[in-house]
Image (tube, rainbow, N blue to C red):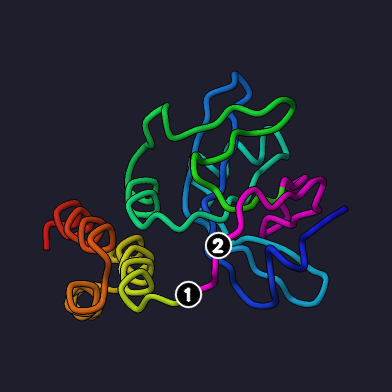
Amino acid sequence: MMLVDEILPQGITETIATTLSPDGVPNAAPMGVVRQGERLFIRMFPGSQTFRNVSETGRLVACIVADPVVFVTSAFGDLEAGCFVPQKDMPPLIKGSYAYVYFRAGVDGVVRLTPLKSEVLARKVPSYSRGFAAVIDAAVTGTRLHFLGEDGKKRIREDAALAKKCGTPRDIEAMDKLLKILGL
């Protein structure tokens, strides 16, 4: 049974997308999966490793992950091998994923997604953390700093203050890592 409706509601869901290169090297990057009605897609930067892998293999897994350090690390570098859980016949999952959707992905301006398999791996009581949200927002802004300049840096500093005020220790760790990566 496909659980796409439960895993990816309408709007943009922040995920960690995993792919494999044609020679089997895993890659992970934060990606917002956009759902508009039954249409699912991702906007990717054409020069990224994730885009190259999807273009070459046509496969992608969207992992639902709640670890802010994984978001920050994968946005600006490579995850360690121990973060990946190899799968048979599909890209790996991220260790600690709550759910995933495995897609056939077609590149046509945007990356159009067709669900092939989905699974809820663990249940979690829904909660909302302003600190976690601030880390994710700052990480997304950080990937766009070359466009946003000083306005982006100001937003990140505001998000950092919010993460320190409202975040868990892991949120604060992730924000500190992000600020160090960005030199802020």
Q: Is residue 137 left or right of residue 106?
A: left
Tell me where residue 68 appears, x and y as whole percent. Answer: 36, 57
- Residue at position x 62%, y 63% in the image: 33
Q: Are marks 2 and 1 in contact (CB under 8 Å)?
A: yes
Give the labeled residue for mark 1: 127
The range drawn in magenta is 102-127
- Residue at position x 56%, y 48% in the image: 17
Tell me where residue 137 appears, x and y as whole percent. Answer: 36, 72
Instruction: Give residue 124's mark.
Output: 2
- Residue at position x 55%, y 62% in the image: 124
- Could you say which quadrant of the image residue 85 lies in? top right
Between 48 and 82, the one lying in front of the other is 82
Instruction: Give residue 64's mark.
Output: none
Q: Amino acid type of disc 1?
A: Ser
Please tell me whether mark 1 sits on a helix, a strand or a loop.
loop
Between 81 and 95, the one lying in front of the other is 95
Tell me where residue 42 appears, x and y as whole percent. Answer: 63, 60
Please tell me whether mark 2 sits on a helix, a strand or a loop.
loop
